[in-house]
Image (cartoon, rainbow, N blue to C red):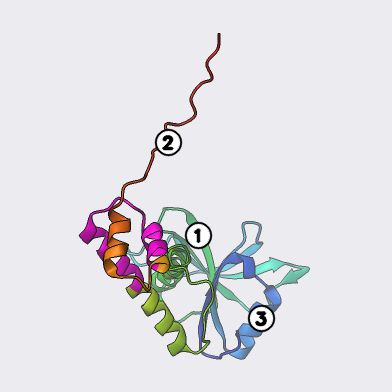
Amino acid sequence: MDEPGATYIFDRGYVNYDAFDRYCKDGIFFVTRLKNNAVIEPLMSNAIPPDSKILADEIVRIGSPQKRVKHELRMIQTEDSEGNLLFLVTNRFDLTGDEIGEMYRNRWAIETFFKWMKQHLRIKRFYGTSERAVHNQIWIALIAFCLHVLVKLETKVDHSLLEISRWLHKLLWQPYAEWLARMKRRPSRTSAGRRPRATS
């Protein structure tokens, strides 16, 4: 992270007091979640608007006397989308507390999307590193996923999207009718589960 003027949002696993001081010195903005055992020294409380979702907005110094951030920071106390309490620290003094809280909540929305993308779009690696290359690969994967959903809806089969995709790969160079027939085919046998062993 070395782009002055940019705002980086990261989780508490990346908390580094020396880095915080460097960001402040170099004009790099950040928003992060404090660890539960962080030592916090309140310096001043900011007023909270009546309709705000923010529970507290304070100017603080974080860290112990042995190891602390030299620069004063801003701590926002808010809740995540599930009602869990969050303590956010930032060097953005120009935004409202609600804007900072929303920035962090949006970060989780992005992480949730990428988790879903890894599970459903089967993107294991990016073939290009430029912004356009990454966007193109994601859009192509999303289009392919949506086409699989449409096929499932149109054919009214009970098979999973993963099974439909596997059959497509297997029958890729065969007539469409073979793929459709495979999707329409019922399982050859059904499992009755483990039967109890007969005893005399």
Q: Which residue is mark 1?
A: 86
Looking at marks 2 and 3 on the same chain, the residue that comes earlier in the sequence is marked by 3
> From this viewpoint, which residue is outermost toward the left?
154
Give the residues drawn in magenta, as a range.
144-168
The kind of residue on which mark 3 rests is Asp
Choose mark 2 or mark 3, whichever is in front.
Answer: 2
**Which element carries disc 2, helix, strand or loop?**
loop
Q: Nearer the viewer, residue 112 or 198?
A: 198
Judge whether residue 149 can be spotted in this image. no
The label shown at residue 161 is none
Residue 100: name its quadrant.
bottom left
The quarter of the picture where the N terminus appears is: bottom right
What is the chief secondary structure element of the magenta stretch? helix
Q: Is residue 143 left or right of residue 119?
A: left
Q: Nearer the viewer, residue 191 or 126?
A: 191
> From this viewpoint, which residue is outermost toward the top?
200
Taking 22 as reference, is 142 above or below it? above
Alpha carbon of mark 2 to alpha carbon of mark 3: how far? Answer: 62 Å
Q: What residue sits 64% from the left and 70% below the top?
A: 15
The label shown at residue 21 is 3
The label shown at residue 191 is 2
Whether the magenta-drawn stretch holds residue 148 is answered as: yes
Position of residue 142 measured from the top left corner of the image (x, y, whole percent): 36, 73
Looking at marks 3 and 1 on the same chain, the residue that comes earlier in the sequence is marked by 3
Whether the magenta-drawn stretch holds residue 63 is answered as: no
Position of residue 71 measured from the top left corner of the image (x, y, whole percent): 64, 79
The kind of residue on which mark 1 rests is Leu
The kind of residue on which mark 2 rests is Ser
Taking 152 as reference, is 16 above or below it? below
Taking 184 as reference, is 92 above or below it? below
Judge whether residue 143 can be spotted in this image. yes
Alpha carbon of mark 3 to alpha carbon of mark 1: how far? Answer: 22 Å
